[in-house]
Image: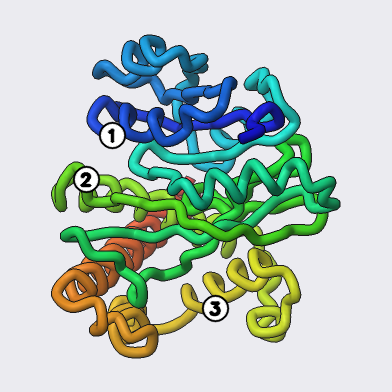
């Protein structure tokens, strides 16, 4: 297996539990970088024992953090495979990744399919979106949005076979809720920022944009304009996407996602109220 053209990038923050398994799944690469957000557990020590190169930087927001990493980490190879600590590459994906970069492809990035698991069950139907750009040339990739960043490649995109397995509940439901409580704050800030900047929204591009990630961006913006979003999200995941076929795991996941959406709704209201109070205070001066 030829892995001489691919570096690996792993983003971490207190990942001592999941990092060892992730590192084992990418051991085929001779250039593994752990990009750490100032962990306070044994994450860095584990990475160094494994032989990975560690870069640390305080986290600010997702797009800024990831863009900085791509621009400043000294990757050895022209291609980078990005993976999180709670994800694992399957043998089929490893083979597809290594073959893709030796195929003289004109693509600058490749989309792969991720499988999310809960209670040992693949959330095949209820998963929001299974495709992600994870193999790319770093100089041809950038990210936008404060959280759940949109990947913006500068060039054509291909798609690979094989799966990236994701275990978002590996640290328990409490950790998932805490993490998404943090995500919801960034999502609310992003919505307020978009409205403040008066960014144009195109309903047409929501359905017709040829680029998958551009279309996803407009679909997300459309979704943010809908009333009763938490209920709509539950119905979308559980009914429209047939999440009920994933059994109890699918029901739980759909409920959790609707709760997450409600967190965003509440925090947007809170930020809007805070901004109005600030404006009132300014007008009285």
Q: What's the CA distance linking mark 2 and mark 1? A: 8 Å
Residue hosting label 1: 18
Residue 230 point in image, percent of width and height: 30, 76
Residue hosting label 2: 170
Is residue 266 in view from this perspective?
no
> Residue 72, relative to residue 190: is it above or below?
above
Residue hosting label 3: 222
- For label 1, the SS is loop
Compare marks 3 and 2 and give the one earlier in the sequence.
Answer: 2
The quadrant holding residue 121 is bottom left
**Badge number at residue 60:** none
Which image quarter holds the N terminus?
A: top right
Front disc: 1 or 3: 1
Circles 2 and 1: CB atoms closer than 8 Å = yes
The quadrant holding residue 70 is top right
- For label 3, the SS is helix
Compare marks 1 and 3 and give the one earlier in the sequence.
Answer: 1
Residue at x-position 33% and y-position 75%: 126
Is residue 98 in view from this perspective?
yes
Q: What's the CA distance linking mark 3 and mark 2? A: 32 Å
Nearer to me, 70 or 246: 246
Residue 108 vs residue 65: left or right?
right
Residue at x-position 26% and y-position 16%: 42
Dot 2 crowding, Cα within 10 Å, few <14, some 14–19, many 20+: some
Q: What's the CA distance linking mark 1 and mark 3? A: 35 Å
> Residue 170, relative to residue 223: is it above or below?
above
Residue at x-position 33% and y-position 86%: 242
């Amino acid at each position: 297996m030829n892995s001489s053209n691919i570096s690996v990038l792993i983003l971490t923050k207190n990942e001592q539990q999941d990092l060892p398994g992730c590192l084992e799944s990418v051991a085929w690469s001779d250039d593994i970088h752990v990009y750490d957000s100032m962990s306070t557990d044994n994450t860095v020590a584990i990475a160094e024992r494994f032989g990975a190169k560690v870069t640390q930087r305080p986290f600010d927001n997702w797009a800024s953090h990831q863009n900085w990493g791509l621009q400043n980490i000294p990757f050895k190879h022209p291609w980078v495979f990005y993976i999180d600590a709670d994800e694992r590459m399957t043998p089929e994906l490893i083979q597809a990744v290594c073959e893709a970069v030796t195929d003289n492809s004109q693509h600058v990035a490749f989309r792969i399919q991720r499988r999310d698991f809960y209670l040992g069950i693949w959330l095949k139907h209820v998963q929001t979106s299974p495709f992600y750009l994870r193999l790319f040339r770093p100089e041809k990739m950038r990210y936008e949005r404060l959280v759940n960043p949109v990947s913006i490649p500068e060039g054509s995109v291909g798609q690979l076979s094989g799966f990236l397995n994701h275990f978002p509940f590996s640290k328990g439901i409490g950790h998932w809720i805490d993490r998404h409580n943090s995500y919801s704050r960034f999502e609310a800030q992003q919505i307020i920022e978009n409205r403040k900047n008066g960014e144009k929204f195109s309903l047409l591009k929501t359905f017709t944009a040829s680029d998958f990630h551009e279309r996803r961006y407009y679909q997300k913006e459309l979704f943010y304009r809908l009333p009763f979003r938490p209920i709509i999200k539950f119905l979308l995941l559980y009914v429209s996407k047939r999440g009920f076929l994933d059994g109890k795991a699918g029901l739980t996941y759909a409920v959790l996602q609707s709760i997450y959406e409600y967190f965003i709704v509440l925090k947007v209201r809170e930020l809007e109220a805070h901004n109005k109070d600030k404006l009132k205070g300014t007008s009285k001066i």
